[in-house]
Image (cartoon, rainbow, N blue to C red):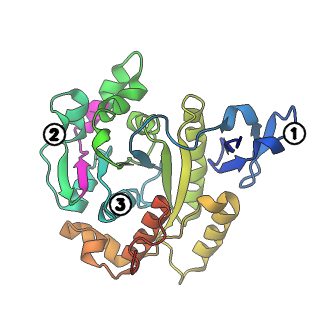
Amino acid sequence: MTTEPLRVVCPRCGKEHRVDVSKIPAGATKAQCRACGHRFALADSARQSDTPKGPGPRRIGVCLSKGGVGKTTTAVHLAAGLALAGNQVLLVDTDTQGQDAYSLGVKPKAGLTELVTGELTADEAVVKARENLWLLAGGRSLAGVKRLIDRKDFGGELTLAEALEPVETAYDYVVVDTSPGWDPLTVNVLFYVYEVLTPVSLEVMTLQGLVEFLKSMSAIQKYRSEVALKYILPTFYDKRIKNPDVILKRLQELYGDLVCEPIRYNVRLSECPAYGKTVYEYAPGSHGAQDYRALVRKVTGNPKLFTVGG
């Protein structure tokens, strides 16, 4: 009989390790992460299943409690790229700025707030943004949702999950964009998603932001072990400047396979939202489009996507 490998997740950096159970010494209670060196209790971080419990879409949160790192750009282009690959995708915007709708050139009259409060059904709140891509828009009204969560005596952290779980069955992927900072909606996102993708601009201050975010996320993992850091995406990579190479190398040393190929600095990425287009539509041959296609290939595990014959 073949024993399924044990999946061990470092509570500090989120790095996943697959361990042959037969090779674990008898009585072993501690493990050490090969990525960051952190020692932790084996029982607290090991689980047999590599997939979410029960059927449903892959739930991916694009999160970091710091602004200006490309979260919205990444969420939009990951979702749009997955849709271009033929998947049914729901993009959920949990930011009060509501920039996802602007980036996609749509003007929804409702969105996530109305779904959470029950004012509208899913069919009324979700808008189709592209072929295979649907949007639950954010916006200023989400401030009221935050107050609603705060007023709950019990289960406030599950508000988002309770609203989305009946809706998600129609999709292959649910991509959730988050706001900067650490607020009740960000906590809700981490109680809903299984996978976290963290964009990290190649700056020293952003590395500090990553460390702080991982500390906050580890507090969530004590109550919800299913959520794990799966991808670290370096952004604003400019080969003309020396410092980003140093930071990128350090990220790779610390987090290994979690680090994706970087998104190069590309002016087309900053221009396309003004036209309500993704970079795949606005400048399909640009570095930005190429790099986000590479991210979609990594997330799907399909290296042939968007290639000749793929």
The quarter of the picture where the N terminus appears is: top right
Residue 107 horizontal/vertical position (percent): 14, 53
- The Cα atoms of the two marked residues, 1 and 2, are separated by 53 Å
Assess disc 2: are there few (<14), some (14-19) or many (≥20) residues with their C-alpha within 10 Å of its C-alpha. Answer: few
Please give the label number shown on residue 25.
1
Measuring 69% from the left and 45% from the top, which residue is drawn there?
Answer: 5
Of callouts 1 and 3, which one flags the residue occurring earlier in the amino acid sequence?
Answer: 1
Please provide the residue range marked out in magenta: 132-145
Assess disc 1: are there few (<14), some (14-19) or many (≥20) residues with their C-alpha within 10 Å of its C-alpha. Answer: few
Give the quadrant of residue 24.
Answer: top right
Please name the residue that numbered disc 3 is placed on. 82
Residue 228 horizontal/vertical position (percent): 56, 44
Nearest the viewer among 161 and 171 is: 171
- Under circle 1, the secondary element is loop
- The Cα atoms of the two marked residues, 1 and 3, are separated by 42 Å
Indicate the amino acid at tag 2. Answer: Asp
- Under circle 3, the secondary element is helix
Indicate the amino acid at tag 3. Answer: Leu
Nearest the viewer among 196 and 43 is: 43
Assess disc 3: are there few (<14), some (14-19) or many (≥20) residues with their C-alpha within 10 Å of its C-alpha. Answer: many
Give the quadrant of residue 118.
Answer: top left
Please give the label number shown on residue 123.
2
Residue 64 horizontal/vertical position (percent): 48, 50
Residue furthest to the right: 26
Of callouts 2 and 3, which one flags the residue occurring earlier in the amino acid sequence?
Answer: 3
Give the quadrant of residue 86.
Answer: bottom left
- Under circle 2, the secondary element is helix
- The Cα atoms of the two marked residues, 2 and 3, are separated by 21 Å
Residue furthest to the top: 153
